[in-house]
Amino acid sequence: MNTLRNKVQLIGNLGNDPEIINLESGKTLAKFAIATNESYKNAKGEKITDTQWHNVVAWGKTAEIIEKYVTKGKEVAIEGKLTSRSYETKEGEKRYITEVVCNELLMLGK
């Protein structure tokens, strides 16, 4: 059960082309956001679609595959873990962000 402690699986579409960063250490980083949609009917019987955006980062070989094959609008299935971190803006404001660190990616659709 230890492998289930921090595990995320999402299927969604990329909102933009991935941002690819090649670090001096030789590692590759891919950053992108995917949208997941959930539909339901409200009390009036109207179909409502709720869209949630998820920030995703991928490293190494996974990032290289994303760089070559994944573009805006593509549907992907990802698996990874949730991480939270903080950073400071140029203005000195502290910001917090939660991301999915992707360790597996499956390209869906055509």
Image (cartoon, rainbow, N blue to C red):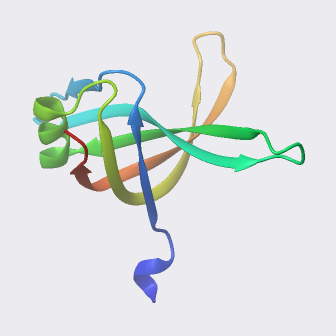
Residue at 71% across / 40% down in the picture? 47
Instruction: Tell me if I can see residue 27 in this picture.
Output: no
Extreme-front residue of the structure? 45
Q: Residue at x 36, y 41 (%)?
A: 57
Expressed as whole percent of the image width and height from the top left, the position of residue 64 reads 12, 38
Which of the pair 60/69 is nearer the observer? 69
**Taking the image as drawn, is residue 38 in sight?**
yes
Q: Quadrant of residue 103?
A: bottom left
* Quadrant (top left, top right, bottom left, bottom right) of the C terminus: top left
In this picture, is 4 found above or below 40? below
How far across and down, in percent of the image, does residue 90 sit? Answer: 58, 11
In this view, the residue in front, 60 or 77, is 77
Given residues 102 and 69, the one toward you in this image is: 69
> Which quadrant, please, contains the N terminus?
bottom left
Q: Position of residue 98 (x, y in %)?
A: 56, 44
Residue furthest bottom in the image: 1
Q: Which residue is drawn at 83% across and 46% down?
A: 42
